[in-house]
Amino acid sequence: MRRKTKQRFLVHNARKGGIIRCLANVVLAWSQSLLSPQGLAHVVAMLCLGTQIVLINVFLVRYLSRTVLLTLIVDVPLFVHLAWFWRPESAHRAAPTQWFSYCWVHAAKVVVLFCRVMPRLPSVSSSEDALRGTDFTIDRAYFENFFSPTMLANVLLITPVFYGLLMFRTSKAIFGSLSKRVTVDLIMHYDMLWHVVIDMVDQVDMFYYARLAEWVGREALENHRHQLVQIQSVVPFLLFFSIVLQAQAFPGVVTDRWTIPEAKSSAALPQPEPVHVAATRSSEAFAQASPRQISGRSLFPAFATAPALPPLPEPEQRSALASEQRQGTSSLRLPSEGENPGEPPPPPMPETARLSVTFASEGLVSGVSSTVSERRSSKSSTVGQKISSQSIKRDEILQDERIRRKQLQALIQLIRQQSVILARKRAAMVSLWVVDIPFLFIRVYLWHMLQHSYFPGLGIKNAICIALNLMQYTLVALASNESYKRIKKDLADYIARFHSAGLEFASEGRSAEPSPELQVARTSGDPSSAIALATPSEAAASASVASTPAQQDARHAEARKQKALLQRALRRVGRETA
C-alpha cells in the first residue's frame, strides 16, 4: 500500500513538473516575441481591449444597472482568445474570429450608450463647438470630470486603434516577407485600413447626435421637434448596422468556398526494406536448406553429373600407409643363399600420383565452396537491386509529394490574399451605403433645416470618401475577378496533375487513364517523356519541341490529354465554387 502511494506521489510530481516546465517555456517564448513588432502589437491590442471593456462597463453600471455585466460572458472569452493566440503565425486564423465577435458585442453596447447613457451625461462644452465637430479634445478640465461626453467619446475611439493593431498583425501573417513588396492586395489591405478607421471616427462623431436637443437651441427645438426626433431615431440603427457590417471589413471573415481534394496519407508510400533485414532473410533461407538440397542436383547440377572419385583415406590410414612405405623401403635387402626371396614389395606411390589425388580432392571442396559463395553473392546482388529499385521509386514519389505540397502552399497563399480583396470590396460597400451616404444626408438635412452658414467638417469627409469608393470600386472588382480566375486555374492545374483519377471525359465517358502510347512514352526512359511530370498548362506549350515523329506524336497526345483533363478540372472547380 505504501509503495502504491509513493508511486502515485512520484507520478503526480512528474506531471506537475512537466506542466510547470511547459508554462515556463511558453512564458519565455512570449517574452521573446515582445521584441518583435507583431508581439508588441499583440500586447497593445490586449491593453486596448481590456481598457475599453472596463471603462464601458463602468459607464453602463453607473447609469443603468449591474445587469449589463452579462456582456462579460462574451467579453471575457474574447479577451482570453486574444491572449491565447499570441503567436504571429496564428494571427490570420484567430484575428477574424476576434474582430467579428467584437463588432457584434460592441454594436449592441454603442446603441445602449447612445440611447441611455449619452443623453444623461453632464455637459462641459458649448453647443456651438459640439455642432461644429470641434469637441474632440483631451483637455485637463475634461479629465477632471470622468463621466462626460468627451470621455465617453474618447473611450469609443479605442476601437479604430484596436482594429489597426489587428490589421497589422494579420498583414504580417498573410504576406510575411511579401509585405516589403508593393502588390495589389497589399495596397488594398492598407487602403481598407485607413478607410475603415476614418469611418469609425465618423461614427463617434455621429454619437454626439444623442445630445442634439442642446445643440440646436430652444427655437429650433420648438419649430422642428418632429424632425429632430426622427434623426435621433435613425442614427442608432445606422450606428448598429454600420458597426456590425464592418465586421466583414477584415481579411478572412468572408472568403470564397474552394474545395481542395484530400491528399494521400504517407502510409501509402512504399517503405524500402532495410539492408540488414534482407541479408538476414537470405542467410536464414540458406541455413534452413537441407544438406540434400545443398549437395543435390537442384543446387549443384554440375557436380551431381560428374564421375565419382575414389574416397580419400583417413588421416590415421595415411600415416600408417606412409610408415609402412618407409619400413618397406628401409628393409629392402638381397636374399641370402638358400632363402626364398618371396614376392617383391609393392613399389611406392609416385609423388605425382599423390599430388593428383590431393589436388582432385581439394578441387572438389573448392568447387563446392565457390558455388556456395557464388550463390550467396547472386542472392545478395538480387536483394541489393530490389532495395535500390524500391529506394528509387520512393525517391520519385517523395519528389512528387514535395512538388504537390509546394503547389498546394502557393494555392493556399493565393486564397489568403484573395480574402484581402474580398474584404476591401465589402468594406467599400459598407462605407458607401451605410456610412458616408446616410451620414452626409443627415448632416446636409440638419444644416439646411437649421439654416447655418457653416458646414460640418466630417461632411466634407463623407463627400470625398463617396468619390473615392466609387472610383476604386471598379479597380477592386477587377482585382477580385482576376484573383478568382487565377485561383480557379491553379486549383484546376493542381487537381488535373495530382488528383486526376476522379476526372472523366465528358465526351468519352471514361476515367482519365493514360492512353497506351502515353504509357509507352512514359516507360521508355526517354527524357522527352518528362512532359508527364509537367503541369497541364505547361504540357501544351512543350508539345512544339522538335524531336522524332514518335516522340512528337506522344507529346501531342499527352498535351491533348492534359488539356482535356484541365478543362474537366475547370468545370469541376466552377461547379464546386458556385
Image (cartoon, grey):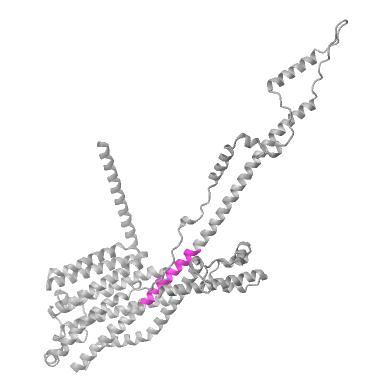
Residue sitting at the far top: 338
Residue drawn at the location 13% of the way across and 68% of the way down? 66
Quick check: can you spot residue 489?
no
Classified by dominant secondary structure, the portion drawn in magenta counts as helix
User: In the image, residue 391 lies at what x, y percent?
Assistant: 55, 53
Region in magenta: 403-422
Left/right placement of residue 448 relative to residue 397 reads left
Q: Nearer the viewer, residue 92 or 286?
A: 286
Quadrant containing the C terminus is bottom left
Relative to 541, does residue 462 appear above or below in the rendering? below
Left/right placement of residue 498 relative to residue 124 reads right
Relative to 221, does residue 401 appear above or below in the rendering? above
User: In the image, residue 452 lies at what x, y percent?
Assistant: 20, 93
Residue drawn at the location 22% of the way across and 70% of the way down? 52
Residue drawn at the location 68% of the way across and 20% of the way down? 316
Residue sitting at the far right: 337
